[in-house]
Amino acid sequence: MGNSINDKSTQMHYIQNRIDMLLKVLDNIDPETAGVEEIDRIIAMLDELELKCKQFRHDWNE
């Protein structure tokens, strides 16, 4: 695993990068040939992003 992300600036940068990655995945999906696997990958990426946001929110409340 990577290093812990503890400061707010780094956490925001991490979230922005993950959103950019998600947008790139969405841009590269061909709607004519996309299948369940692509939808599952998008859902997994959103779940991971949600988990990180919740972790960071907990850190910000401390």
Image (cartoon, rainbow, N blue to C red):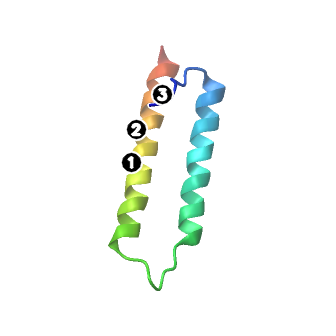
Tag nearer the camera, 3 or 1? 1
- Separation of marks 3 and 2 at Cα, in angstroms: 10 Å
Q: Residues within 10 Å of mark 1 (few under 14, many from 20)?
A: few
Task: Report if the CB atoms under discs 2 and 1 are less than 8 Å apart.
Answer: yes
Residue at 62% from the left image edge and 34% from the top image edge: 12
Q: In this view, does 60 lie above or below 29?
A: above
Residue type at numbered disc 3: Arg
SS at badge 2: helix
Residue 61 screen position, x and y as percent: 48, 18
Numbered-mark total: 3
Snapshot quadrant of residue 51 = top left
> Which residue is at 63% across, 28% downward?
10
| Residue sitting farthest toward the top | 62
SS state under label 1: helix
Question: What separation in Å lies between label 2 and label 1 (alpha carbons)?
Answer: 6 Å
List the residue tagged with mark 3: 57
Measured as percent of width and height from the top left, residue 7 is found at 60, 21
Identify which amino acid the numbered label 1 is placed on: Asp
Instruction: Write down the residue under mark 2.
Output: 51
Name above or below for residue 54 compared with residue 37: above
Q: Distance between the residues labelled 3 and 1?
A: 15 Å
Residue 22: quadrant of the picture: bottom right
Q: Residue 47 carries which label?
A: 1
**Residue, x 52% and y 21% (percent of image)?**
60
* Callout 3 secondary element: helix
For the residue pair 55 and 28, the one nearer the viewer reads as 28
Vertical arrangement, residue 48 with respect to residue 56, above or below:
below
Residue 52 in the image: x percent, y percent? 45, 36
**Where residue 44 sits in the image (x, y, percent)?**
38, 53
Label 2: how many Cα within 10 Å (few below 14, some 14–19, many 20+): few
Q: Are marks 3 and 2 in contact (CB under 8 Å)?
A: no
